[in-house]
Amino acid sequence: MRSKESLALAESIIAGAVPDARACTALADVPDGEVFHLLAGADLIREHFFGGAIHICTICNGKSGRCSEDCTFCSQSVFSKTDVPVYPLLSGEELRKGARYAAESPVNRYSIVTSGKGLSRGEVAAVAEAIASMEHGKVGYCGSLGILGRDDFEILRKAGMTRYHHNLETSRSHFDRICSTHSYQERIDTIRAAREAGLSICSGGIFGIGETDEQVLELALTLKELEVDAVPVNFLIPIKGTSMEGRRELTPLRCLKIIALFRYVLPDKDILVCGGREANLQELHPLIFFAGASGIMTGNYLTTTGRAIDHDMRMLDHLNFTARKQ
């Protein structure tokens, strides 16, 4: 696919067309070295739906380590031999500290993230109590608390949580290679339960874990079918002690291709580039927006160092973008 073709496809998408299977496959088949042919169209779509306003989110590692699940990329799994911090659910005051910081910054959303398959009802109640006591109006509140049920989501929504984050991680056809302690269907059921409870949905994946380009497309199409509202794109940072510590298959060009592919398939959904963006994109990092990204996660990630918000704001200013208002 050349630049002229990608621009024509982008214009048809903006006009309301949905790419058929042939067009989607053609996007996935573009060699990494030719990814710049996709960027003009991806940028056109991003500009049409989101303009120059960039969504910014940040997270709090609210409960760390000793996760019972065996996700191969995760340093918090009990199956990994890492030295990540281990602690129970933070106090309400500790959770509120992050919310106060977010409210005083250009951040749009603040998310509480916890390790483990899911939280107990008591832990859900504690998170809900913390959220209810936070200042509302300046920032949106999200949770990434694992596999929960409809009743849990009702409690969280009534407390003031507006969005639930629950990544599918990868395509259904690849999931069994990265996790065996819970099923792909459990993740989909969690997303549906959260939406039924009235929460918007943030769900995406992590790349560089052995997936093919076809499986990247498969995940994008699944997220489209689920009608998620925002899609976090993470790139693997191989962490010593995990089973993927030696895997280094990503290149900056492939990262851009993944972002662009998601933009064509999910034209009007926020695509947020999160973990691993600097480490994997390196000098091409600012091009994520021209590949179609409409948002970023700023600050530290769960167990790895991220990028300071003042650096991100300076980058946006240099590119003539602005932080989106709540």
Image: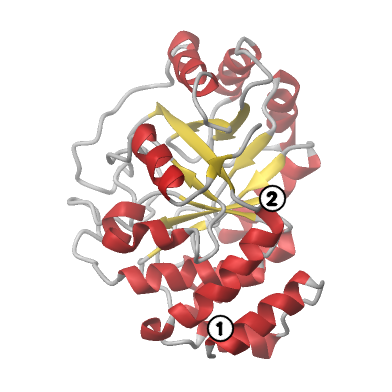
CB contact under 8 Å: marks 2 and 1: no
In the rendered structure, the answer to whether residue 182 lies left or right of residue 154 reads left
The CA span between labels 2 and 1 is: 22 Å
Q: Is residue 98 above or below residue 229?
A: above
- Does the rendering let one see residue 86? yes
**Residue 285, quarter of picture:** bottom left
In the rendered structure, the answer to whether residue 230 lies left or right of residue 99 reads right
Q: How was this image coloured? A: secondary structure
Q: Dot 1: few (<14), some (14–19), or many (≥20) neighbours within 10 Å?
A: many
- What amino acid is at disc 1? Leu
Image x and y of residue 59, in percent: 46, 33
In the rendered structure, the answer to whether residue 169 lies left or right of residue 138 reads left
- What amino acid is at disc 2? Asp
The kind of secondary structure element at disc 1 is: helix
Which residue is found at the position 71% from the left and 42% from the top? 200
Image x and y of residue 187, in percent: 60, 52
Front residue of 227/274: it is 274
Q: Earlier in the sequence, mark 2 or mark 1?
A: 1
- Does the rendering let one see residue 173? no
In the rendered structure, the answer to whether residue 247 lies left or right of residue 6 reads left
Front residue of 111/289: it is 289
Which residue is found at the position 59% from the left and 50% from the top? 52
Image x and y of residue 275, in percent: 38, 49
The disc label shown at residue 194, or none: none
The disc label shown at residue 27, or none: 1
Q: Which residue is mark 2?
A: 229
**Quadrant where the N terminus lies?**
bottom right
Front residue of 326/322: it is 322
The kind of secondary structure element at disc 2 is: loop
Image x and y of residue 309, in percent: 39, 34
Which residue is found at the position 17% from the left and 51% from the top? 240
**Residue 253, quarter of picture:** bottom left
